[in-house]
Image (tube, grey):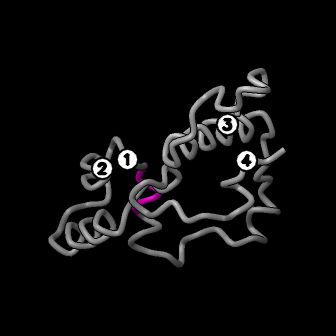
Amino acid sequence: MPYWFETKKLRVGKDKDRRRKLFDEDKQNIKELYKNGFAIREIARIFENKCCRRSIQFVLFPERLPTKEYRKENNYFYNRKKHNKYMKKHRRHLKEIYGLKKNRCKSYPQLGY
């Protein structure tokens, strides 16, 4: 059964969304560094903890993003176990944002609401 915040489709906000690697300010910084003569590898070293070199290329050259047809042809597989792990982590983060606590329901503590 989904959590109430999943059915309401509440907006988390760009600053608290963990699925984003680069924020708008980061993208602007990448573009400025590239205009100032930095190589893509140098920029990747600067943003090493946030993203990879390929992500920086996608920011600078959006036409290099893979299309749906390319993904189908080149076997971009869906890994169910990996997806479940990341969704569990994401839901836990949303619970923290909305202030939900463990064992909130006193009549059914085993459910962990």
Q: Which mark is residue 50?
A: 1
Q: Distance between the residues labelled 4 and 1?
A: 29 Å
Give the residue pinned by disc 4. Answer: 3
- Direction bottom: furthest residue: 63
Q: Residue 88 carries which label?
A: 3
* Residue at the image position 70 percent from the left and 55 percent from the top: 6
Q: Where is residue 37 in the image (x, y as percent from the top left)?
A: 17, 69
In the image: residue 62, left or right of residue 53:
right
- The boundaries of the magenta stretch are 52-56
The secondary structure type at the circle numbered 2 is loop
The secondary structure type at the circle numbered 3 is helix
* Residue at the image position 43 percent from the left and 63 percent from the top: 14
Name the residue type under label 2.
Phe
Q: In which quarter of the image is residue 83?
A: top right
Give the residue pinned by disc 2. Answer: 47
Q: Which of marks 3 and 2 is nearer the N terminus?
A: 2
Name the residue type under label 4.
Tyr
Q: Marks 1 and 2: in contact by CB < 8 Å?
A: yes
Q: Residues within 10 Å of mark 4 (few under 14, many from 20)?
A: few
